[in-house]
Image (cartoon, rainbow, N blue to C red):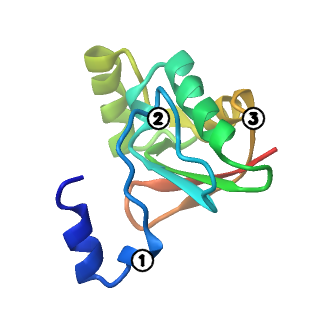
Amino acid sequence: MAGAPAVLEEHRVAERVRVVEGSFFDAIPAGGDAYILKNVIHDWPDDDAVHILGNVRKAAAAGKNVLLVELVIPQHNRDFLGKWLDLEMLVGAGARERSAAEYGQLLSSAGFRMTRVVETASPFSVVEAIAV
């Protein structure tokens, strides 16, 4: 966080961003138009992931979006980076990579409705959901 203000100033967006220190296990700042979590949910077992998403839902008004940038496990049986990382997450953190359906279940448990999964040119996808 210490370097964030300088980067935001350099890119001339400081007036549009609020940098807040804290833990997503305690609370999320309320009032955002959208909440973006990149490589966060895959770090945690289901119960902790739902807790984090539940805190986001407490902060997000109905109709607001959450965007998860994650390695979504595809349905095919071809090689995919996320399948290897899934093993690493299981062994190292007791966590895991998830399929689109599994992200949908987590989000539903936390008060969101998954609207779509957008694949990107990278191995990452954007899981989009709306607070209900």
Q: Residue 111 carries which label?
A: 3
The residue type indicated by label 2 comes to: Ile
Q: Quadrant of residue 128?
A: bottom right
Against 44, residue 120 (above or below) is below
Q: Which is closer to the viewer, label 1 or label 2?
A: 1
Q: In which quarter of the image is residue 90?
A: top left
Q: How far apart are marks 1 and 2 (CA)?
A: 28 Å
Provide the secondary structure element on which disc 1 rests.
Answer: helix
Q: Which mark is residue 35?
A: none
x and y percentages locating residue 74 in the rendered image = 53, 44
Provide the secondary structure element on which disc 3 rests.
Answer: loop
The residue type indicated by label 1 comes to: Glu
Q: Distance between the residues labelled 3 and 2?
A: 15 Å
Who's the residue at 49% across and 55% down the image? 125
Q: In this view, does 114 lie to the left or right of 15?
A: right
Against 70, residue 19 (above or below) is below
x and y percentages locating residue 73 in the rendered image = 50, 40
